[in-house]
Structure formats: C-alpha cells, structure tokens
Image: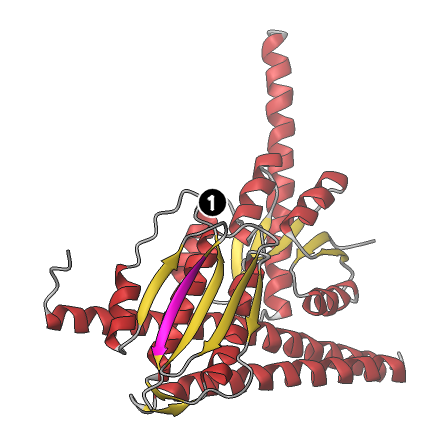
Amino acid sequence: MNQNTGSEEEKLLMENSLTFFGAITASVSHELNNVISIINQTAGLLDDLLIGSREGRPIKTERLEKMAGSVKNQTDRGIDIIRRLNKFAHSTDEPVREYDPGDMIENLVSLTRRLADMKKVTLEMVPADGPVPVVGNPFQAQQAVFMAIRLALSTSLENDTIRIEMLEQEDVLKLLISGIRSDQGAEFDLSYLKLLTESFGGTITHRSEGEPTTLEITVPRGK
Amino acid sequence: MATAKVLIVDDEKEFSDVLAERMESRGFEVDTVESGAEALEQVSKRNYDAIILDLAMPRMDGIETLRRLLEENADLQILLLTGHATMEKGIEAVKKGATDFLEKPADINVLIEKIMDAQSKKTLLFEKRMEDAVSDIMKKKSW
C-alpha cells in the first residue's frame, strides 16, 4: 500500500530523475574519457616521434597516416557521443512537448549501450513502422525505459539480448522491454516505475508468461 | 636491456597499443591484453614488474581482476587506471591491494615514475622473501 503523500511522491520523482540524469552522464563521461585518452596518447606519441626526428630518426609517412586516421576516428566517435548527450540533455527543456519516441529511445539505447556492453548483453531496438508523434514529457518516458532496461540488465546473463519494441496504437504507444529473467531469483519492485509511469498518465505491467519476461510501458499519445 | 616488464590491461585496444609503443620507445618491455581473463592467463606465463589495469572493463571489471590477480600472486604490483580518480576510489583500490592508482588520461611521465616505484617495491619484496627463506633454513638447522 502506497503511504506516500503527494509531496513525498514528488520528492521521490525528483530524486530519481536526478539519479537517472547522473547515471547517463557518468556513463557518457567514461566513454568520452576513453576517447580523450586515445587522442592524448596519440598526441604524446607524435611528440615522441618529433623529438626522435630532431635526433636523426626520420618519421615514416605510413606511421603519420595511421595516427591521423586514429585521431579522426576518435574525434568522430567523440562528436557522436556529444551529439547524443546533447539530445538527451535537451529532452528536459520542456515538461510537455511533441516528440518522436522512436528517435528518443534510439538515442537512449545508444547512450545506455555501454552499460549493456559491460555485461556482454546486446541491446536491440525494434522501432515502430514510422514516426509516432507523442505529446508528453520525453524525459520521464526515457527514464521509465531506462529503469526497465536496468532491471533487465540486473537479471541478465552474458550473451543475452534485451529488446525494446514500439507498438503504435490509437491513443497510446506501447513500449515492450523483453529479456527480463524472472528465474534469477531477483525480486521485482515495480513500485517506483508504477509511480513514474502514472505521473505521465501511463501504465506499467510485468508480462510474466514464458521466460524471459517482458515489461510493458504504455505512454499516452496525448493527441 | 629493458627497464621493466609491463602488462597493460585495457579493453580499449587503441589506447593500450599507443601507450605500449610510447613505453617501448623508452626502453620498457610491454605486453597488452584486452580483458581480465586474458590478464590472468598472461600473468601465469610471464613475470611482470608492473601491471597497468583499467578499472572499467566488460565482464570482469578492474576490481575483480585485481582481486583474482592478487589471489594468484600477492606480490604483483598493480596500478589501477580510473576515469574518475576520487580519493575514495583510490583508497578502495589500495585497500584491495593495488600498488597505486592514476586518472585517465594518464601523463606518461607520472605513469613511468609509478612503474619504477612498483618495480622497486617488487624487488624489495623479493629480497625480503629470500631473507626470510634463509632465516627459516638457519633456524631449522639451529645455526
């Protein structure tokens, strides 16, 4: 039985929103740090080679080409990460707006992929047939999907696949997060996810027929 | 003659390869592996003066790799590379047996200094073991 008052629930939603934002930015900062580290060491190697060149050890063109290629690849990787983080950050701009959940979830999956990679789990997204415009809170919807993914990751084994599927319906968008093992002894506490989805007018259901199981989140389309 | 034998353990191969090349140009003998499991295998085949171990790796992370490496050989000198070197993480790593920790991106001169410190520590530990072994033998023979 939920004994939280309205203000306690708001506080809980706010705290968990910050935790969610922190989890995404921490993961992204780790990835960006790896990119910077590679570029940093490559710059250092270039310095080393230049010193060697002044001491009479010529630099091979192929060596420079390889290093230039590495810097370009890592820069491209960094730009992609920053672009995605920027998109995520701007999902907090307005509490209610029209957005494309497919684009949003694809971005979230990309930002979350590192967490899945750490467990050698594949994250797969099955989009809807076309854009599905929704009027609502994109940040909260992402948070709900993220928490469902994290729940799935907590039960997953190496080489598992977690699938996020979008099903368009007249008034709602259904998000199915499948690949949740309920046979791993973990207790599912969906109380916070229930609070979160209800805060934007949605629902959450644990479909436990068969194994692995599925979480179904509905997001009102708000048309 | 090589200054020291070093093993780099990091899932970012490009990072390991460039760092290895820079260290080899400074006289170090360097091997690289991409996972904790590979590190365990490599350490069973070769004796290293220092191991540079990334904290965040898939499957077996740096802390678990550290634990298992030290289980095999408590004298291993392991430097943890972390993306976020808070004092807390550093203390945690050292409590779990790491020789030291560094923040990525790592300055190569600082890294080399810590590797040389690790090598000295390893030498001292080896000498102490030899002394203890000799002392034990002498006690047994009541000399």
Residue A90, image x, y percentages = 40, 89
x then y, percent, for residue A116: 54, 62
Asked whether A188 or B111 is in front, the reply is A188
Give the position of the C terminus of chain B as an image quadrant: top right
Q: Indicate how the structure is coloured in the image.
A: secondary structure
Q: What stretch is highlighted in magenta?
A: A214-219
Q: In this view, does B58 lie to the left or right of A142?
A: right
Is residue B123 visible in the rendered image? The answer is yes
On the picture, is B85 further left or further right than A93?
right
Most common SS among magenta residues: strand
Residue B49 visible somewhere in the drawing: no
Q: Is residue A218 magenta?
A: yes
Which residue is found at the position 12% from the left and 72% from the top? A6
Residue where numbered disc 1 is placed: B96
Q: In this view, does B25 lie above or below B95?
A: below
Q: Residue at x 15, y 59 (%)?
A: A2
Q: Given the current orientation, which residue lies at the most extreme top position? A: B142
Judge whether B130 appears above or below A180 on screen: above
Q: Nearer the viewer, residue A145 or B123?
A: A145
Does dot 1 land on a helix, a strand or a loop? loop
Please tell me in which quadrant of the rendered image residue B8 appears: bottom right
Crowding near pointer 1: few (<14 within 10 Å), some, many (20+)? some
Residue A167 image point, x, y percent: 47, 75
The reply to whether the magenta stretch includes residue B88 is no
Residue for point 57% across, 68% down: A124
Q: Which amino acid does label 1 sit on?
A: Lys
Q: Nearer the viewer, residue A218 or B86?
A: A218
The residue shown at (66%, 53%) is: B35
* Figure quadrant of residue A59: bottom right
The mark tally for this picture is 1
Residue in front for this viewpoint, A152 or B12: A152
Identify the chain of the residue marked 1, using the numbered disc in the image. B
